[in-house]
Amino acid sequence: MSPAVFRLALAGALLFACTPALAVRVQQVRIEGLHDPAIEANVRSALSLEAELDKELRPRRLAYLLRVAQDETRTALEPFGYYTPTITLTRSDRRGSASTEPDADEEDTPDDAATTDVASGGEKSASTLDDADADSTRADPTARGTIRGRADALTITLTITLGPPVRVRGFDLGIDGAASADASVAAAVAQFHPRAGEVLNHALYEDGKARIGRALTEHGWFDARMAEHRVEVTRAAQAADLALRWSSGQRYTLGDVRFNQTPEPFLRDALLHKLVRWQPGTPFDQAELERLRSALVALDYFALVDVQAAPEQAVDRTTPVLVELTPAKRSIYSLGLSYATLDGPGISAGVERRYLNARGHKALAQIDWARLRKTVTLQYRIPAFAWLDGWYTASLQASDELTDYVNSRRLELVASRSGQVNDHLNVVASLHLLRERWAYRTILKPVEEFRFASFLFPALQAEYIDVDDRMAPRRGMGASLILRGGKGGSSGDASFAQLYLSGQWFHGLDADSRLIARGELGHTFTDDVLDLPPSLRFYAGGDRSVRGYGWHEIGPRIVTSGGDYFTGAPNLLTASLEYERYFNGPWGAAVFVDTGSAFDGRRPDMHTGIGIGLRWRSPVGPVRIDIAHGLNAPDSPVTLHLNIGADL
């Protein structure tokens, strides 16, 4: 071989030897042996490999990631109480070849007691080195199975045997000081986990510690400090010793409330101070501040309500309460269009003044005008804070209804007092003066002459709502009870007493479906229900009653040659069960069965309807379009029902 050829061959060999191995790519990381999704999710969040999926990696970078994967997995398992797992790491490429990485040297883990600070939270993940640091790590590309010429696609499998969990052995938890006698604080201490004999779950530990801290703060123990905070884990014994104690100090009291209305005051402070239910010197309770905030929000005067205690400004442990208020827009204007099968097209318009004066009075005017139904409402409200937060209300409503079978005009004056008993229950006591004129009619002439009736009667209404979401509930119930009765009629001799109860129950089956049950029950004590005006009778059929039947068509009727005229009844019974499921974003469907009747006597003539519906979570609220068919007559028409708005 000539010297020139030898030199050329030597240069090529050296060049080939110095060429780095081509990149590899981790296509998938599989985790086997874990049956708890929360644990697996925490392991994946800790693995640096997860952030490098489908990226081309240099062999040294891959070698580093594989080496730290076991340490990262161990760290991620510790918050759940598993400190001595067995971890096997296997690499396989697309050709089916596989190799196993040895487990980390367990002798590096001390068997003696180690103190662990978990104050920063339960779940942990290890940090990674950058590429420069990784390149400084020694690795043998050939041993790692890297092939030259193209990126190899690898699947990394972590097989984990958890082993026995660490359990709490020593347990010292308590409050030193006067707060130990506080019922709310004691309840938070009693709910703390993990306790002796339980698995050392760091998330539960942090939740319990935070719950006790909140209870101390919410009851005015602002000087409370942690006197001892210690978690010791002995890996060899699979045991942990906990010591967690607070020194509570003295409880603060509630002081004066300072209202700040910005940009300038528009309501009297005297009005707002009526909402404050405590006297200065009352033991501090965050629930009192929340009740004040809720009462201010319910007034609907303000766009922003911020209620905060200021313990840093306390004098002799009496803390003032600072309330920041920003007014809402003073006037609300509304305009809408409507269409109903019986009423035809219509328009509604209204204006509400959130506050008329510095005393917080409100006013409302609204008109609903359709071809066959017209209603005008005027309302005036005054804040009422004695006994229960609520309103004194005076309202006047005039309505005119003209359908194929009834011609009715009504004028009603109502004076009421509402009261918010608690977060779920609202009660309204009212006095009604009703004047109504009505007649059943055909297209050409009335079936009977107009009748007139005047009634004066008191009423009591209670509304209870306890749901997770007022717009689209998935858990909870709502119910309404109305009691009313009085004397009047065309001759002044008619009397009545009436009970009406309605309710809805919601139960979420999974994230996309729910069951809805609904029912109504009503009874009227009277000699002759036809002596009562139509607005005081019960009806069944139509939207939110028994779908598959026309509006008010279930119940007693007058049969004439000009048609049937539904008179209403003294009794009402309806029930409904609906299954609703959403499939794609805001769109869903429903199936339902309704049954019920408005009836005389003791035996209801139940009418049942079934149907399907389309659901849409629109920006303005749920939209429900239902198609239903009544089962009581084979020739019953298919009915279409449209509802827009919240379920409650």
Image (tube, rainbow, N blue to C red):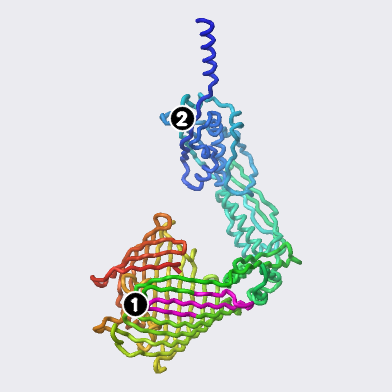
**Residue 141: x %, y % from top left:** 52, 25
Amino acid type at image mark 2? Asp
Look at 44% across and 67% down and name the residue there.
Answer: 645
Mark 2 in CB contact with mark 1 (< 8 angstroms)? no
625 and 49: which is toward the camera: 625
Assign a secondary structure to mark 2: strand
Q: Viewed as shown, does residue 524 lie left or right of 67?
A: left
Please name the amino acid that badge 1 sits on: His
Indicate yes or no whether the magenta region holds residue 355.
yes
* Residue sticking out furthest to the top: 2
Instruction: Inspect the magenta stretch and tell me whether residue 46 lies in it.
Output: no
Q: Earlier in the sequence, mark 2 or mark 1?
A: 2
> Which secondary structure class fits the magenta region best?
strand
State the extent of the magenta-drawn residues as a range. 350-377
Q: Nearer the viewer, residue 443 or 324?
A: 443
Query: Can you give x and y, in whole percent of width and height, for residue 170 in the image?
Result: 62, 50
Disc 1 residue crowd, few under 14, some 14–19, many 20+, Cα 10 Å: many
Q: Which of the 4 quarters of the picture holds residue 116?
A: top right
Q: Disc 2 marks which residue?
A: 152
Q: Residue furthest right?
A: 316
Residue 634 x %, y %: 23, 70
Q: Is residue 274 above or below residue 145?
A: below
Instruction: Note whether 558 is above or below 11 in the view shown.
Output: below
Question: Which of these two is toward me, 381 or 208?
Answer: 381
Q: Which numbered disc covers residue 552?
A: 1
